[in-house]
Image (cartoon, rainbow, N blue to C red):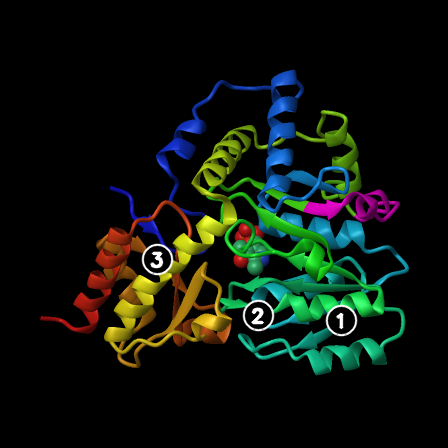
Amino acid sequence: MSALLLNPGPVTLSERVRQALLQPDLCHREAEFASLQARIRDDLLGVYCLPAGIWSAVLLTGSGTAAVEALLTSLLPRTGTVLVIENGVYGERMTRIAALHGIGHVRVTHPWGGALDLARIEQALEATPGITHVAVVHHETTTGRLNDLARLGALCRAGGLRLLVDAVSSFGGELIDFAGWGVSACAATANKCLHGVPGTAFVIAERAVLDACCEPARSLYLDLGAYARAQDGGSTPFTQSVHAFYALAAALAELAQEGGWQARRRRYAELQQIVRDGLGALGVTPLHAAAESSVVLSAYALPPAIDYRLLHDHLKERGFVIYAGQGDLAARIFRVSTMGALTDGDMHRFVDAVSALFKPG
Ligand SMILES: *Cc1c(COP(=O)(O)O)cnc(C)c1O
């Protein structure tokens, strides 16, 4: 039996999504593909009830980072400057993307896992003339912190700035208040909270924002404007990950039937509570209190006597794949995700497996 994936994507698939991969071979220039693509684009907007006249979902073949890179390189005009907010690996990655492409940017850094410091962000906005966009990670998967975008959004709105969001590990599993927070565009992926397979990522943006994509494009392959135009015409600029599309369509149907993102969020919260309670009883503490954490993933402090590799291998032998901390956190934490086709029983067995190592005998 293969192990259950408790890493933050790719996730353990439901049988329905796995079976969807076995549908007929399909050419991406045929009408059947066009209707599959159109259905997925509609259903993605449907997850957060975004009206199709105002919003557009653009499908890409690549991992979540492709969508984030497409978001920043396509939507930042050459005359624009983006303020990038960093409090973990993925915020820092957005800065690297901006730097690589020569996009004007300034950073507001925080310690990994730290809460957004709105006062410093406001100061940076005032101190730097010409900022047009703010880029932020919604769920910073580095530590499990869910960044507060309501207050940040209000700040952006007051300054007339466009808010660009890396929602790769929150889309489908957490509240994203597009209108209330004033989100201009977000990037996400099929294989995290949506429970699809790796290979498909997407950007959801206001149509007006897509119409104003950077010209000439900074990238041939990641030009959102070209994808949006082609997809609105029932086409695609390049070969898409057809089978991953099949899986995403099935995953979106499953999400809708289960009660949408709200039901998924409740489900994740239940699964997370089992792990938090179970590990808490072993003296293992989460990095973030529940109120600051996503329900998608929690980071836990490694007990001093336990090496990550030992814990990982012990759990893998018992059918669970967990995730290491990144950078300086590698020696200090381990991470457990609640995404994918998981049951209460799976989480109880997981806690038992951890317990067997931490409390032998
Ligand atoms: C997973 C993730 C990404 C993208 O990672 P890929 O390996 O490219 O899929 C980007 N941002 C966040 C917050 C993530 O969790």
* Disc 2: CA contacts within 10 A as few (<14), some (14-19) or many (>=20): many
Per the rendered image, the range of residues in magenta is 204-218
Q: Amino acid at mark 3?
A: Leu
* 21 over 214 or under it: above or below: above
Image location (x, y in percent) of residue 282: 24, 75
Q: Which residue is mark 1?
A: 155
- Camera-nearest residue between 156 and 219: 156
| 352 on left or right of 171 | left
The verdict on label 2 being within 8 Å of ligand 1 is yes
> Which residue is depicted at the point 53% across and 49% down?
172
Which mark is drawn over residue 271? 3
* Mark 3 touches mark 1? (CB < 8 Å): no
Quarter containing the C terminus: bottom left
The answer for how far apart the CA atoms under marks 1 and 2 are is 21 Å
The answer for how far apart the CA atoms under marks 3 and 1 are is 34 Å
Classify the position of ligand 1 by quadrant: top left, top right, bottom left or bottom right: bottom right
